[in-house]
Image: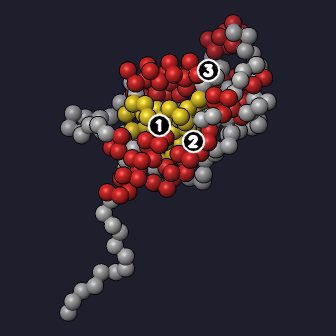
C-alpha cells in the first residue's frame, strides 16, 4: 500500500520502470482468440482481438529484455467454480457453451505464453484479483505499477484494471495490446479508463520509455577495478 511519503509516479517512464512495474497478460487463450474457440463458436468476429496479438508479442519481447516482471492470467471456468450469478447470466444470455475448461485446448494460451519463471495466476471471475493470489504475487515483487494487456478490453481487462486501481496500484492500459469483440466496446473502455482509473498508451509509447530508461542508465563497468600501488 502506498503512503503519503512515497513519490508519485507521474511520467510513463516512471510507471514502466522495471524496478516496480509488471506487465500483466489477461486471458490470451484459445477460447477467446482462436478460430474454433468459445468466442468464435458463439458467432463472433475475432478480427479486433487477433489484431492485438502481434503488438502484444513484441511488447512481451521488449519487456523481457528490459527485465520487467511478467505475469500471465489464465481464466478457468469449470462448472464447479462458477457462481450462481455467473450461471444465471450465461443462461440469460444463451451463452452456456463450455469455455476455458481445465486441461483443454480452449484454456491454453494463444500465440503468446509464459516463459519459465513467469507466474501464471488462475482466475474464475472477470477480475484477475478476485479470489486469486495476484495481489500477493505483485506485492512480493515490490510492484507498484501495472501495464495491462489482453482480452477482452471491456470485460476482464477493465475489471482487472478497476480492481487494481482500487488496491492502490498505478494502472496503465496498453491500448493496441488489448482487444474486444467490437471496436466500440474497446474504445469505450479506453475512454472510461483514461477519465477515471488508468493511463492509456500504446505499445510504442511503452517501448520508447524503456529505451529512454536504458539510455539514461549509467554504463556498466567491465572487468575488475584496478588499483595503483
State the residue lying farthest toward the top.
92
| Closer to us: 144 or 184 | 184
Q: Quadrant of the N terminus?
A: top left
Q: What SS does tag 3 mark?
A: loop
Q: Which residue is disc 1 drawn over?
A: 202
Between the residue at mark 3 and the residue at mark 1, the CA separation in whole angstroms equals: 18 Å
Residue 182, given in percent of the width and then of the height, sits at 62, 20
Residue 11, given in percent of the width and then of the height, sits at 31, 39
Residue 191, given in percent of the width and then of the height, sits at 44, 21
Residue 90, given in percent of the width and then of the height, sits at 69, 13
Tell which circle, 3 or 1, labels the residue nearer the N-terminal end. 3
Q: What SS does tag 2 mark?
A: helix
Q: Where is residue 123, by image quadrant?
A: top right
Between the residue at mark 1 and the residue at mark 2, the CA separation in whole angstroms equals: 9 Å
Give the residue displayed 40% in from the left and 24% down from the top.
194
Tell which circle, 2 or 3, labels the residue nearer the N-terminal end. 2
Task: Give yes or no for contact between labels 2 and 3 (Cβ–Cβ under 8 Å).
Answer: no
Q: Which residue is disc 3 drawn over?
A: 182
Q: Point out which mark residue 35 bears.
A: none
Q: How many marks?
A: 3
| Closer to us: 218 or 92 | 218
Give the residue displayed 43% in from the left and 34% down from the top.
201
Q: Is residue 126 visible?
A: no
Q: Quadrant of the C terminus?
A: bottom left
Tell which circle, 1 or 2, labels the residue nearer the N-terminal end. 2
Q: Residues within 10 Å of mark 2 (few under 14, many from 20)?
A: some
Q: Residues within 10 Å of mark 1 (few under 14, many from 20)?
A: some
Task: Give yes or no for contact between labels 3 and 1 (Cβ–Cβ under 8 Å).
Answer: no
Task: Give yes or no for contact between labels 1 and 2 (Cβ–Cβ under 8 Å).
Answer: no
Q: Using residue 20 as the reference point, say whether residue 173 is left or right of it.
A: right
Q: Which residue is disc 2 drawn over?
A: 55
Amino acid at each position: 500500500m502506498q503512503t503519503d511519503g512515497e513519490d508519485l509516479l507521474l511520467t510513463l517512464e516512471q510507471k514502466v520502470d522495471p524496478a516496480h512495474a509488471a506487465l500483466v497478460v489477461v486471458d490470451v487463450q484459445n477460447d477467446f482468440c482462436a478460430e474454433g474457440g468459445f468466442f468464435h463458436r458463439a458467432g463472433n468476429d475475432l478480427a479486433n482481438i487477433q489484431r492485438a496479438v502481434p503488438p502484444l508479442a513484441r511488447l512481451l519481447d521488449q519487456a523481457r529484455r528490459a527485465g520487467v516482471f511478467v505475469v500471465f492470467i489464465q481464466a478457468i471456468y469449470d462448472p464447479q467454480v462458477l457462481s450462481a450469478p455467473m450461471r444465471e447470466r450465461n443462461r440469460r444470455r444463451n451463452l452456456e457453451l463450455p469455455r476455458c475448461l481445465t486441461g483443454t485446448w480452449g484454456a491454453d494460451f494463444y500465440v503468446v505464453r509464459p516463459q519459465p519463471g513467469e507466474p501464471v495466476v488462475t482466475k474464475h471471475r472477470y477480475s484477475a484479483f478476485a479470489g486469486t493470489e495476484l495481489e500477493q504475487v505483485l506485492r512480493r515483487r515490490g510492484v507498484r505499477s501495472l501495464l495491462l494487456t489482453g482480452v477482452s478490453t471491456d470485460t476482464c481487462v477493465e475489471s482487472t484494471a478497476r480492481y487494481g486501481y482500487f488496491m492502490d496500484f498505478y494502472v496503465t492500459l496498453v491500448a493496441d495490446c488489448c482487444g474486444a469483440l467490437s471496436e466500440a466496446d474497446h474504445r469505450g473502455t479506453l475512454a472510461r479508463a483514461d477519465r477515471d482509473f488508468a493511463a492509456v498508451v500504446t505499445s510504442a509509447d511503452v517501448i520508447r520509455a524503456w529505451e529512454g530508461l536504458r539510455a539514461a542508465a549509467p554504463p556498466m563497468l567491465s572487468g575488475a577495478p584496478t588499483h595503483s600501488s
